[in-house]
Image (cartoon, grey):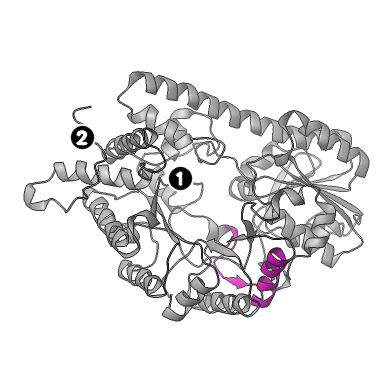
Amino acid sequence: MSQQVRPVKSVLYVRLPVWKIWPGGVVYVADFIHKQRPDIGQELLDLAVIPAGRRKAALTERLAALKPDVVAFSWRNMQTFGPHPENDALDVVMNFDHSPSPWKRVKAAWQAVGIITDYAMQRVRNFGYLKLVRSLLPQSRLVVGGTAVSIFGKYIVERCPTDTVVVVGEGEDAMLSIVDGFTEPAGNYYHKDASGHVHHHPAEENFNLPQLTAIDFAYIDSIFPAFAEYVGPGKEAIGVHTKRGCPFQCNFCLYNKIEGAHQRYRDPAEVAKEVETLSKVYGVQNIWFTDAQFCSTRRSMAHVEAILDEMLARQIKVRWTGYLRLNYLTAEIAKKMVASGLESIDLSFTGSQDMIDSLTLGYALDQQMAAFRLFQDAGMTDQKIKLYLPLNAPDESPETLFATIDRIDELYEMFGRDKVLPFIFFVGVQPNTPIEKKLIAAGYLPKSYDPLTLNPFLIKKLLYNPQPLGRLIGRAYLEALEYSSKMDDTQGEYIGRATLEILARELASKKPASHQRRLSSIPITTTTHEQV
């Protein structure tokens, strides 16, 4: 670390525009800095809740009023193909590539141009906010972090003003060293120096996570004017972190690079205290555990059980969920999950061991299905089963699709069809992942492609759904979408279930009668894709 040259007196955190979602990462950083350096003044400006036409003025006002020594931006989202509450990118791509209607394809092309233009302008505006700070406060230190930055840091730093630190992954150690005045911070970061040169400093060690005690929400309320818009009865879920790091090597994921492969844990009592305060003081009803996976390894299951024990002992009344990995679930932990307020089982799912192995997910399908039966035995009633299906990933085949549909049929029988929600999505190709390297080696992607490209034809490739199965899946999805749009809420079939139903029928129609699977009697459609 370099010399300490200029201790910091004030920090302004700026959450860059995104759909309205709790800014958990920056809240943890601000809380940590306050506990370590309580004399430093901090404020959090959330541009997500400010009308677009007022954002620049709002930032200018806070810069003029505070004159912060450090302005730290949190940037969550950057890629154009990631569907989220503000756009329907998946529907647009499916219509453009696979709709049998020329009009819908033209309409989708126009919508795609709108989505890409919006993302391009969003990037221009976000970099503009950084440049605004540099022009108004030329001596201030600029810091950029967040999910998007952790994935695309080396691409982002090139477009930043001088003397900008782009933090990759965990931000606590980096921010602490920055507020202590060190010119070269701690942690994993890129730095664009005063002369415009960029250098990268990899993390020497991971943040000591037990230092994250329960958030002081009264303090956060005092520095975060938009706090009440997120916290309270009837609001969206609040994110709570219990651990960091992931030892698995899923070939499309970067968590093990960003947070490290070694799992580190917060004190279960501190996690439960945080949830208790949200529930009993602020009326929060829904919690989302924001870990890469709330439970995964044998050791992490013990940590989860300790958190659940604390929540049950404190009689905390919340509904909670998070991404689950069920390798080491026990009957006792399943019962505690249900008793403590489990709202849904959320997990990536494929019903084929071949696909599990191809994606290097690192678990046995039989083990996962057995875990579902443990939940069934634990007395699940109204909880949903949310299955995120990476359809048509590399090595997918009609046989593996059939296997996935068969396993989902088993889940329908276990929990009831209306409780199982298959989410249709496709692998998004991220930089520096094994799947990216595989697709470059196969010639699917150019070696020198830009992960932040605005080329619509390359963007479509990054949402991986190639032929020959791509058209079949796309047509099934569109048919399900059209069917669902014509039904009211009492008649309509959930689009993921409808898509799989249509896929099953289309796949079965291409097999000899002796190989056809049992099909559901739900009448989704009477028109085949061949007739369309």
Q: What kind of element bears circle 2? A: loop
Q: Position of residue 509 (x, y in %)?
A: 14, 42
Q: Nearer the viewer, residue 105 or 499?
A: 499
Q: Residue at x 32, y 43 (%)?
A: 499
Kind of residue at disc 1: Gly
Marks 2 and 1 close (CB-CB < 8 Å): no
Give the Cα separation between the discs numbered 2 and 1.
32 Å
Q: Answer with left or right where residue 394 lies relative to residue 7.
A: left
Q: Is residue 428 above or below residue 246?
A: above
Residue 17 is a magenta residue: no
User: For residue 262, which numbered disc appears in the image?
Assistant: none
Q: Nearer the viewer, residue 282 or 452?
A: 282
Residue 261 is a magenta residue: yes
Magenta residues?
258-280
Report the quarter where the N terminus lies. Answer: bottom right
Residue farthest to the front, as pictured: 490
- Mainly helix, strand or loop, the magenta region? helix
Q: Is residue 448 above or below residue 185?
A: above
Q: Position of residue 130 (x, y in %)?
A: 77, 37
Q: Residue at x 85, y 35 (%)?
A: 60
Q: Position of residue 96 (x, y in %)?
A: 39, 27
Q: What kind of element bears circle 1? A: loop
Q: Answer with left or right where residue 58 lies relative to residue 172.
A: right
